[in-house]
Image: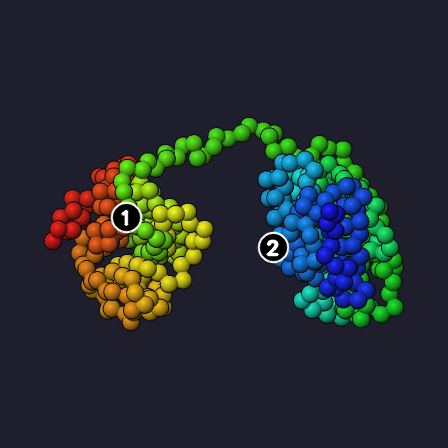
Amino acid sequence: MNIPFLKTDALPFCKGCGHDLIAKNTTRALEKLGFKPLDVIIVTDIGCHGIIDKCLNTHTVHGLHGRSAALGAGITFGVEEPGKKVIVFIGDGGSTIGLQHIMEAARLNLNMTVVVHNNFLYGMTGGQTSGLTPHGFNTTTSFEGNPYAGYDICALSHTAGASHVTRVMGIGDISDKLAVAFGTRGFSLVEVMEICPSYGMKLNPKRKLSEIVESAGKEIGEWFNQREPFNIRQGKKIADLLEKTRPVEKGFKSYLKKNTSVILSGSAGEGVQLAASLLCKAAMRSGLSITQKGSYPVTVGVGFSTAEINLSPEEIHFHGIAVPDMVVITSGDGLAHNKQRIAKMKDGFLFIDQSLEVPSTGAQVIQHNFRGIGARNASIFSIFFLAMKTGIISTESILKTIEEEGMTEKLPVAKIKEALVQ
């Protein structure tokens, strides 16, 4: 069964838009080269060109504005199979937002193709001037013509070291030009010159594409560098960092029967993330699967610190927590950050320091003097208390984890044991 590259010929672009021509000629070029849809990864970003995603039968990735070249580079690093092709679609606006990404891909000569949809302005956001807008071209932010010349992205890419660069007019059949680029070993870039029918034509009446390109001094042509494409094996390979990580050995039992979500929250600098890590490793020692996510303000060291943890006897396929099963709060900062989620709890447990006002919740509330052992160790104490009260893991598994992590002398283990029996 032959699967077409496009699901439909009725593409979602404005009538007369060159993006339609690029998309259809891209598929023709890929067919000429013998590619199949699932041999191809097409990466797009914010911009009119990006709405092609839903019409493609290829692999597609849609990224942030200007970042499609960076995403394409990342995919290229990870795809070593022969016969696969990474193609990046990007607009003139995105190409200057992410110009350094394109230059780095050209410099390294990564095995990918960037197709620049250059319609001389930001078409999706209102027709503003971009970094590739030609001198004298009218936009919604340059009604009397752009006073500056745009970048020559072909010259920049060629100078950076691209194997193949070409500039073409977005008129007629350009599939052969695209096929040359797609068949290039190493980095290739195709700049397709076009006019936006919604803004470019309206603001520049009677101007022809050929005249605009010529007056901008942008030569139609192609340029080559004789270089070998990037080889991921070049240079000395560093040691695998995971080889230095000791495996967590199972040595304890857990009687947990279902996925259980736990939130630990307190103040920054009070060991919340460390406590979460110890709890997770103790759970792994007990045969459980875990996920851990940390949240805290950009200004690390002040305000709240929250850890979200999932524990399960089965594999975990989603790490998010909407309404937690258990919440442990050791400070006012942690309470303020989690009040809304605590209010949504209909059951489960809320462990909260006795110095704090108990918020509205349907959870069973258990108050305790976590901070009595010292603010910096309140969260560490709280995970022992949680284990003792719920039985999801044993306190012995946490003690073994502390020992294995070499933290027995750093943490007040004796004090914690004494506090647990009080």
Q: Residue at x 39, y 47 (%)?
A: 314
Q: Which residue is mark 2?
A: 63
Taking the view exactly as shown, the residue that stands out farthest to the front is 1
- Residue 272 left/right relative to 83: left
Q: Amino acid at mark 2?
A: Gly
User: Looking at the image, which is closer to me, 78 or 30?
Assistant: 30
Q: CA distance from mark 2 to mark 1?
A: 43 Å
Question: Is the image coloured rainbow, by chain, by secondary structure, or in one colour?
Answer: rainbow
Q: Which residue is mark 1?
A: 255
17, above or below 3, in the image: below
Horizontal and vertical percent for residue 334?
31, 61
Q: Residue at x 34, y 64 (%)?
A: 338
Horizontal and vertical percent for residue 262?
33, 56
Q: Secondary structure under badge 2?
A: loop
Q: Residues within 10 Å of mark 1 (few under 14, many from 20)?
A: few
Q: Amino acid at mark 1?
A: Tyr
Mark 2 or 1: in front is 1
| Residue 258 seen from this side | yes
- Residue 62 left/right relative to 113: left
Quarter assignment of residue 341: bottom left
Quarter assignment of residue 198: bottom right
Horizontal and vertical percent for residue 419?
15, 51
Q: Residues within 10 Å of mark 2 (few under 14, many from 20)?
A: some
